[in-house]
Amino acid sequence: MSYRIVIEPGAKSKNYWKDLWAYRGLFYFLAWRDVLVRYKQAAIGIGWSVIRPLLTIAAMWFIGALFNSKVPDGVPRVLLVSAATLPWTFFSTAFSEASNSLIANSNLLSKVYFPRLIVPVSTIMVCLIDFFISFILLALLMVVYRYVPDWRILLMPLFLLLAVVTALGTGLLIAALNVKYRDFRYIVSFIVQFGLYASPVAFSSEDVYHKLAQLGQAGMVLKVIYSLNPVVGVIDGFRWSILGSNVSIYMPGFLCSIAISFFFLFLGVWYFRRTERAFADVI
Amino acid sequence: MEPLIKVENLGKKYVLSHKRPERYVALRDVLSNKVKSIFRPKDNTFHPTEEFWALNDISFDVNPGDRVGIIGRNGAGKSTLLKILSRITEPTKGRVTIDGRVSSLLEVGTGFHPELTGRENIFLNGSILGMGRKEIEAKFDEIVAFAEVEKFLDTPVKRYSSGMYVRLAFAVAAHLEPEILIVDEVLAVGDSAFQKKCLGKMEEVSGQGRTILFVSHNMQAVQTLCNKGILLHKGNLIHSGPMHSVLEKYLEAHASADSSYEIPLPKNIADISGYAYKLQIEDINSNSVSEVPMGEHWQVRIFFNITKATPHFVIALGVSTMFDMPLQTTWSAPKDLETGEYEVVFKNSDIIYTEGQYKLVVGLSSEKRVMQYTEGAGLITISDVSAVANDERIINTKSGLLINQMETIITKK
């Protein structure tokens, strides 16, 4: 017969990726459910996708201005901050939603079979929709400031993909750990809070590298640590593609950050696949 | 014939930890235990764990078109078996080979979201159960008609009555068309009319040659629906084969005949003015017996205690089959009783039950308010060692539960 399932302890399912494709309908419906539920009983509904990044932009703009961080020539501070807030907001919501997705859907996990990867991945879809809505906000701001992007904007989808990779990798890892060790949810909120300040949202990477260079030996170490933050690569990429030639990228740091993103993706998928068979037993 | 499902030496082990009452492990505990164990490396009592085999060395085959009933007491491993077969959890050892598409229904309304409307939930639930979008669209009207929720399709299901909710959920599941359907206890929900409808639907499905695995406590349902059975007890497979033989084994293992039974005291004993505490099976000469030969008269003596003067007291005895189908109820004439010890005798002299075991139900009431109601208060065993039972018509035919003959007159016209 064409469809044969073998259930064995520890057996690597040969059909896993095929199954994932077969269950794409479920993936679509789970994402659709999350979108529907999100806007069903909310008074402002879709407005939240605008208000949240708008407030973050305002706060980050204020902090950047307060510390008088350096803005590249010809770039309004608001656009510098906005180009970073969008990917940051996407990353932080996608990361935390994906991390909590398995726990939130525990009744599904214990009652139905499907490739478990669908759950965290579908939550990221919802965050992508939010991202596109808030992107309109950025477009409006660019119109207001009469800022014309150049050809680099065409590469933006690549950096969006990088943001997805980063959020998915870390999200999968934490989601799988969260099933067994529930205290990872505290780590999630900590990472999201801390990350806002450890990532170049209110300021530019250029400024950070410049200031760290003045610190000598200690600055070198901090520079390496800073480049290890995968979100740095995402944000720098976004700024480069949106703001154009006014922004330069520090290549070694950027590449290092991208490498870390992919490292987390492989680690996340590997750990998730390794533990997912026991999810129903421990959740 | 090639079996559709082949289960070989299947086992599932859980490790029970007696230390932690919490539902989940906290990383902080793991870390602190690791640190502690550095200082106490040989302390093995630190983590008292116990291995527990929820399933142990189970092997059986299911052929295409079989309708298999899986029965056993609570904790026998039925649900674990279904969970392994539906790939929700992984076995510890052994192997299962399944040739075909499996849909499992371990719960009614899995993934239903209260905020979503009936229409939206049909699509969501359908896709969770493995249906494609086109398949759901094609069956949509049928599902809605089966669930009888046409008017409320665009109402969030949180506003549904529980009956509507269950009907909708079952309707979606009932329209699945996999080669193998795995069902767990779903019929335990809904009102009896709907349960009947569900059973009918399941019979219809099984009539189409679909393979079904069915777990239920409802022996009546298992009996009507399934042609093969598997009996599990504490994780072991006791018996498998044709349904009737499995049911026999089940009854054998679960009902031991006795001549007298202690009736458990009701929980609300402080609020009631009397209670029954013992029941005795006797022959016609008031000798207590554990078995009654078929056709002989028998009586049930119930001992009860009246703690406060009770007006309009009625005690009732019910007889039901082992599958909980009520056969007969007898009520005593109402009487005002004062405090004291009492006994009552229910004499059966005209109805002849066929060989087998029957459950006894005891009920006490005062002024039509129930004081005590105990199902399975005792068992009565009718044996087939008697003149009546040796009647070859009874031996050779399934003559029915009641042996009494009607008056029959043949006349020539």
Image: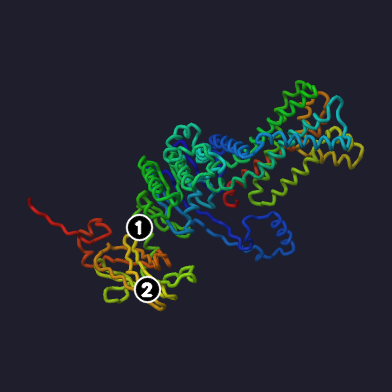
- Relative to B196, say whether A72 is above or below: above
Residue B54 picture location, percent across and down: 51, 57
In which quarter of the view is residue B285 placed? Answer: bottom left
Name the residue at 28% across, 59% down: B401
Q: Please name which of the two marks, 2 or 1, marks the residue nearer to the observer.
A: 2
The kind of secondary structure element at disc 1 is: loop
Q: Label 1 is placed on what type of residue?
A: Met
Q: Which disc is residue A9 wearing?
A: none
Q: Chain of mark 2?
A: B
Find residue B325 and name its label: 1
Q: Which residue is mark 2?
A: B336
What is the crowding at mark 2: few (fewer than 14 residues within 10 Å), some, or many (at least 20)? few
**Is disc 2 placed on a helix, strand or loop?**
strand
Query: Quadrant of the rendered structure where residue A71 is?
Result: top right
Is residue B34 in sight in this rendering?
Answer: yes
The quadrant holding residue B284 is bottom left
Three-letter code for the amino acid on which mark 2 is drawn: Asp
User: Residue at coordinates 72% horizontally, 25% vertically from top-left?
Assistant: A155
Q: Is residue A31 left or right of residue B104?
A: right
Q: Is residue A232 placed above or below B46 in the rendered structure?
A: above
Q: Position of residue B181 (x, y in %)?
A: 44, 44
**Is residue A1 left or right of A170 when viewed as pictured?**
left
Report how far apart the C-alphas of labels 2 and 1 lie in the structure.
32 Å
Residue occupying the far left of the picture: B413
Q: Residue at x 44, y 76 (%)?
A: B307
Instruction: Pick the residue in front: B232 or A148.
Output: A148
Q: Is residue A235 above or below residue B229?
A: above
Q: Chain of mark 1?
A: B
**Residue B74 in the image, given as x and y percentages of width and height:** 47, 59
- Mark 1: give few (<14), some (14-19) or many (20+) Cα within 10 Å: few
Identify the image quadrant of the N terminus of chain B: top left
